[in-house]
Image: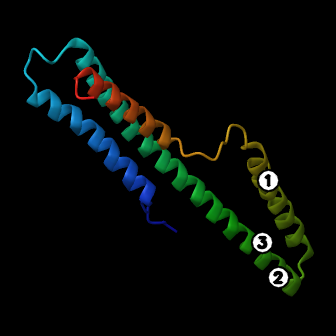
């Protein structure tokens, strides 16, 4: 089962603002005279570009991670449904030997899933980490605009 990746309103907002935060310094540097473009302006501009590129890479990795977690959760739900169906088949067929083998396998899978769900709660704040990149880009844009003399 392949789930189609959907973009939320937050994703679109973060991508558009990051792009705008990168385009504004490019426009200012292109329209400024060479004497107005100082080393601090170029350093901040390079930092903005670096954070923008890192943000794109991070967004790609984060989207893949979220998709993998969603797939795992869907598979876990499917596994629970299969377990219920298996119990019904066992009742209908009443094969004791087959029951023991499947029961042991199912317990191992359930134990692995329970262990995965219990141990992965460290460091989760419930905040989208892409917002941190957006805030860094905003701060860098403000620094750039102040250094360029616009603010």
Pick whichever of labels 3 and 1 is earlier in the sequence. Answer: 3
Q: Residues within 10 Å of mark 2 (few under 14, many from 20)?
A: few
Residue 100 placement, left or right of 124: right
> What's the CA distance linking mark 3 and mark 2?
9 Å
- Label 2 belongs to which residue? 88
Distance between mark 2 and mark 1 Cα atoms: 23 Å
Q: Tell me which label, 2 or 1, sits earlier in the chain.
A: 2
Name the residue at 49% across, 37% down: 132
Residue 83 marker: 3
- Asked whether, in this view, residue 52 is left or right of residue 74, the answer is left
Q: Residue visible at 22% across and 37% down?
A: 24
On the rendered structure, is 58 left or right of 141?
right
Comparing 150 with 114, the one in front is: 150
Q: Quadrant of residue 38?
A: top left
Q: Residues within 10 Å of mark 3 (few under 14, many from 20)?
A: some
Rendered image quadrant of residue 60: top left
**Which residue is the site of mark 1?**
114
Q: Residue at x 44, y 65 (%)?
A: 4
Whether residues under marks 3 and 2 lie with C-beta atoms below 8 angstroms apart, the answer is no
The image shows residue 126, relative to residue 35, as above or below, that is below
Q: Earlier in the sequence, mark 3 or mark 2?
A: 3
Label 2 residue SS: helix
Residue in view at x 90 percent, y 82 percent: 94
- 61 is higher (above) or lower (below) than 93: above
Q: Estimate the x, y position of residue 130 in percent, counting from the top left.
A: 47, 42
């Amino acid at each position: 089962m392949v789930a189609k990746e959907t973009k939320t309103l937050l994703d679109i907002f973060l991508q558009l603002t990051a792009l705008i935060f990168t385009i504004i310094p490019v426009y200012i540097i292109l329209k400024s005279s060479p004497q107005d473009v100082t080393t601090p302006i170029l350093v901040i501009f390079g930092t903005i570009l670096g954070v923008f590129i890192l943000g794109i890479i991070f967004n790609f990795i984060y989207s893949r991670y979220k998709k993998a977690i969603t797939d795992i959760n869907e598979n876990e739900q499917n596994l629970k449904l299969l377990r219920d169906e298996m119990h019904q088949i066992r009742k209908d067929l009443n094969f004791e030997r087959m029951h023991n083998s499947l029961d042991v396998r199912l317990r191992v899978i359930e134990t692995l899933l329970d262990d995965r769900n219990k141990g992965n709660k460290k460091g989760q704040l419930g905040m989208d980490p892409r917002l941190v990149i957006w805030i860094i880009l905003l701060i860098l844009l403000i620094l750039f605009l102040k250094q360029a003399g616009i603010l």
